Structures are given as C-alpha cells and as structure tokens.
Image (cartoon, rainbow, N blue to C red):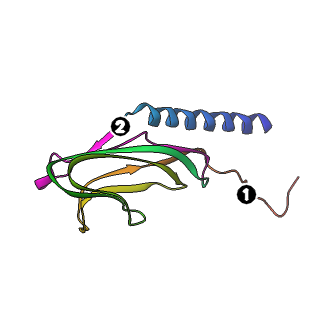
C-alpha cells in the first residue's frame, strides 16, 4: 500500500512539473481586441505566477507593455479588484512594472481614462506545484 501511495505521489509531482514547465515555456502573451481597437496590444511578462501550494500567495515582478494606434489618455486597470494601476496622458504606448502578490489569477485591461470599457485585456494566471499542504483528517481509523 505504501509503494502504491509513493507511486501516485511521484506521478502527481511529475504531472505538476510538466504543467509548470509548459506554462513557463510560453513567452509574453499578447491580446488584441476586436472592432475599432484591432491593433491595440497589451502584454505582461513574465507569466504565470507560481506558488508552491494551492492557496499560497505567489510573488512576481511583472511588466506591462501596451500600445495603441491613437494617442489619448489611457489607464491600466486591475479588473479583478477594479483598481486603476497607472494612467498615461496623451500617449500611444506605455510600460508599467509592479510586484504582483496574489493567491488567485487577476485580469487586467487597458481603458481610456474615465471609461469602463476595456480596449484590450490580459491575465496573470496563478498556478501552483502542489494542490494542498493539508491532508483530509479522519476522526477514526480501521487499522
């Protein structure tokens, strides 16, 4: 029984590592919106943010880069928390770096200042190596 449990643990660790490596291989992800903003771009690097165990806070210094064909007043917004991260006046591109700290994925968007319409979106996904640090505890045992 112990051998079977250790094989399952090893297999699960191997699967987690493969997923983690495949997530880290992908470079910056660009998002482009449809319609009038077809050439607007928003990228964030690096992606994803990886914590050791599910539910733990992951820490990552990320850099957002954006560009738009029209100069205007734009803001980078954390859509998940509805918080404005940074605004630019009369710009067609910009860059912003900050320390991302979260236990869950966050969505970000580029918007015109004082608007709630997303021009282009991107996400910082939060991944983890292990599902949980706690085992289900039983109140009684058969053996």
Check disc 2 and report the residue beneath it.
28
Vertical relation: 105 (above or below) 66: below
Magenta-tinted stretch? 28-54
Q: Residues within 10 Å of mark 1 (few under 14, many from 20)?
A: few
Element on which disc 1 rests: loop
Residue 41 appears in view: no
Residue 75 in the figure: left or right of residue 61: left
Disc number for residue 66: none
Q: Where residue 37 sits in the image (x, y, percent)? A: 15, 52
Q: Where residue 23 sits in the image (x, y, percent)? A: 45, 37
Location of the N terminus by quadrant is top right
Residue 122 in the figure: left or right of residue 141: left
Question: Residue visible at 44% across and 44% down?
Answer: 62
| Residue 82 quadrant | bottom left
How far separated are the C-alphas under marks 1 and 2?
Answer: 38 Å
Q: Where residue 120 sits in the image (x, y, percent)? A: 25, 53
| Residue 51 quadrant | top right
Disc number for residue 136: 1
Question: Residue visible at 43% across and 30% down?
Answer: 25
Q: Where residue 44 sits in the image (x, y, percent)? A: 37, 44
Question: Residue visible at 28% across and 46% down?
Answer: 94
Front residue of 50 and 92: 92
Vertical relation: 9 (above or below) 90: above
Element on which disc 2 rests: loop
Residue 82 in the figure: left or right of residue 114: right
Q: Nearer the viewer, mark 1 or mark 2?
A: 2
Q: Is residue 71 magenta?
A: no
First of labels 1, 2 by sequence position: 2
Q: Is residue 45 magenta?
A: yes
Front residue of 51 and 1: 51
Question: Residue visible at 31% across and 56% down?
Answer: 109
């Amino acid at each position: 029984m112990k051998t079977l449990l250790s094989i399952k643990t090893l297999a699960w660790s191997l699967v987690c590592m493969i997923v983690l490596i495949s997530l880290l291989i992908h470079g910056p992800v660009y998002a482009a919106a449809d319609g009038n903003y077809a050439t607007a771009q928003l990228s964030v690097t690096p992606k994803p943010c990886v914590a050791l165990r599910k539910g733990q806070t992951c820490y990552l210094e990320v850099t957002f880069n954006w560009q738009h064909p029209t100069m205007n007043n734009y803001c980078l917004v954390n859509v998940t928390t509805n918080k404005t991260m940074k605004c630019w006046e009369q710009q067609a591109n910009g860059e912003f770096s900050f320390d991302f700290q979260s236990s869950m994925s966050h969505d970000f968007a580029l918007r015109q200042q004082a608007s709630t319409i997303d021009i282009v979106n991107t996400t910082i996904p939060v991944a983890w190596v292990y599902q949980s640090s706690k085992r289900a505890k039983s109140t009684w045992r058969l053996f």
